[in-house]
Image (tube, helix red, strand yellow):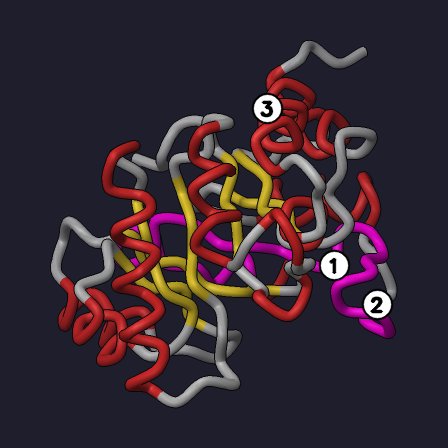
Amino acid sequence: MLPAPPLLLITDRSQVRGGSRGDLADVVAQACAGGCRWISLREKDLSPAAQVALFARLRTATRPFGARLTLHGAPELARAAGADGVHLPGGGDPAAARALLGAGALVGLSVHTSEEARAADPALLDYITVSPVFLTASKPGYGPALGGEGLAAVVAAAPVPVIALAGITAATAGLCRKAGAAGIAVMGDVMRAQEPAATVRTLAQAFAAETD
């Protein structure tokens, strides 16, 4: 079962502004205060040891909220960090991840097409992320964007829950739900926010709201 609310916060410390907002751990703690209960560390430019050390800081920040904390990358690194699961890149090996991390871990995979989504094995994967749903400032140049219709096609093909990723804002979250997405994944909208807690609340409410 996916964490509730179904909002996955993916970290990117390069987008965290300095000043009174503090560092990545502070932003994550504020996001949790706003209701986020699912965070994944994605800081692949760091060494494995540095990722494990940063993960430990995020664990301290998230523990009071009971949030699930996963890691984007190798299953071996996720296990070394004591993560609650792993998010695999496209072409990753869900079978190996599940065997290493066990039945209780959250295991996800990045996909970009309906064909890739159709191949997702529900015995191994808890969810997939599909991107880019919309154009995003976090990863300029990625595309073309799937849009609502493209997302709906991926959802129809996928045998596992689909998490919509890229360009997700309060204005687009409801469109993702209308297309059948089980949840949303966000990065820059929270990382760059002046008030991460309020941004998370707004995103979660927008996704949960009834759509026409």
Residue kind at label 3, given as amino acid type: Arg
Among the two numbered marks 2 and 1 on one chain, the one whose residue lies closer to the N terminus: 1
Residue sitting at the far bottom? 47
Which residue is disc 3 drawn over? 201
Quarter of the image where the N terminus is located: top left
Q: Which amino acid does label 1 sit on?
A: Pro
Q: Which of marks 3 and 2 is in front?
A: 3
What kind of element bears circle 3?
helix
Main SS class of the magenta portion in the image: loop
Q: How many labels does the image show?
A: 3
Magenta span includes 33: no
Q: Do the numbered discs 2 and 1 sit on residues whose CB atoms are within 8 Å?
A: yes
**Residue at 12% in and 60% down:** 102
Position above or below: 107 against 96: above
**In this figure, which residue is indicated by the disc labeled 2?**
143
Where in the figure is residue 108, as x and y percent of width and height? 40, 58
Which one is nearer the viewer's eye here, 61 or 173? 61
What is the CA distance from the residue labelled 3 to the residue labelled 2?
28 Å
Q: Residue 132 got which mark?
A: 1
Marks 1 and 3, how far apart in space?
23 Å
Nearer mark to the viewer, of 1 and 3: 3
Stretch in magenta? 117-143
Residue nearest the viewer, comparing 107 with 15: 15
Q: Give the mark nearest the N terminus, 3 or 2.
A: 2
* Label 2 Cα neighbours within 10 Å, binned few <14 / some 14-19 / many ≥20: some
Percent position (x, y) of residue 208?
Answer: 60, 18
User: Tag 2: residue type?
Assistant: Gly
